[in-house]
Image (spheres, helix red, strand yellow):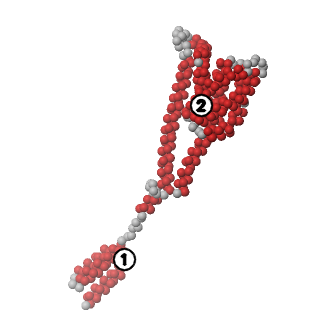
Amino acid sequence: MATTLTSHHKFSSLTKTHKTYPSSPLLLLSTKLLTKSNPSKNTILSAKKTRTLIAGSLKEDKKVVPVKDKHLNDKNNPLFVNGSKDSDLLSSSSSSSIVESDDDEDRMTSRAINATIVLGCGTLAVSRLLTIDYDYWHGWTLYEILRYLPEHNWIAYEQALKANPVLAKMAISGVVYSIGDWIAQCYQGKPIFEFDRTRMFRSGLVGFTLHGSLSHYYYQFCEALFPFEDWWVVPAKVAFDQTVWAAVWNSIYYVALGLLRFESLDNIYRELKATFWLLLTAGWKLWPFAHLITYGVIPLEQRLLWVDCVELIWVTILSTYSNEKSEARISDATSEANSSPSGSADEK
């Protein structure tokens, strides 16, 4: 009986010690030693108490590891599309970089096409001018070729005027209006090979189809309207040119470009009304002095060639006024269209 009390006392002291020093291997070792020393008396303790002590020690030794919610983790991870605002920024930055790379490729392609057009047309024009006497210069020296080059080109131009005056003047006006629009785009800040081909084609088409033919008949009409040789005829022609004809032609050019841009008649009318007086007064700073030579010195058949040379300056002004408001309106509409989806997305 005393042995049983002693062993019970030892087990109670072991449980107290276990609370102070939670080491499960030592408790298992002490339990085995007590079982070996008293095999007959400690069978119940080894079956019940030992299981209780092992279970308690395992509970104390176990560390609780918090489990994070994967869904919440994914929301904070910027690599997930359905996450926080960082993921939106990442996706927008990646998409903007892709768009920028595409824009760079398009820009390089457009620049290569423009350079090919300019260099090809320039090479063709210069070669035609330099080889005007190709069939005759056999045995000529370089000095003789350069000496007769301007004269023979002028003779070829006069022959073209006699053969088909309207078509020759249309071709000259088409070339001048294309080059004038190109100069206007460069004046507005675009690089020399990054011009708008469609805009230049529109201006050249208007010059070819309308300016050359209408100017041919206008100068004949002006001569019939003032069939005099007095001193006041030249100022009268200049005044008529810079009031009636300038107003008519500026309106025709403005409306024709608007129609080629597929604009509505209301927009064309509003823009023409806003710039009509500005265009007319801007022409008064240039054309009265040029037309003193036009109507006072230049023969009738050569007047359009002289006027087209001055037109290189005037078309730069005319094309700038005509395309400035349209391009500004298109850019404003594009910016509003780009800002409206972002605004609706922010509201969501």
Q: Position of residue 155 (x, y in %)?
A: 60, 14
Q: Position of residue 14 (x, y in %)?
A: 33, 81
Picture residue at 36% right of the left edge, 74% below the top: 60
Q: Position of residue 258 (x, y in %)?
A: 60, 36
Alpha carbon of mark 1 to alpha carbon of mark 2: how far?
A: 97 Å
Mark 2 sits on what residue? 203
Picture residue at 28% right of the left edge, 85% below the top: 7
The reply, left or right, for residue 251 in relation to residue 66 is right
Picture residue at 57% right of the left edge, 34% below the top: 260
Q: Is residue 59 above or below residue 167?
A: below
Q: Position of residue 226 (x, y in %)?
A: 73, 21
| Residue 230 in view in this figure | yes
Q: Residue furthest top?
A: 139
Residue nearest the viewer, comparing 135 with 167 = 167
Any mark on residue 208, and which? none
Is label 1 or label 2 in front?
2
Q: Is residue 96 above or below residue 250?
A: below
SS of the residue at dot 1? loop
Mark 1 sits on what residue? 21
Q: Is residue 115 above or below residue 88?
A: above
> Residue 211 is drawn in which quadrant?
top right
> Mark 2: which amino acid?
Ser
SS of the residue at dot 2? helix
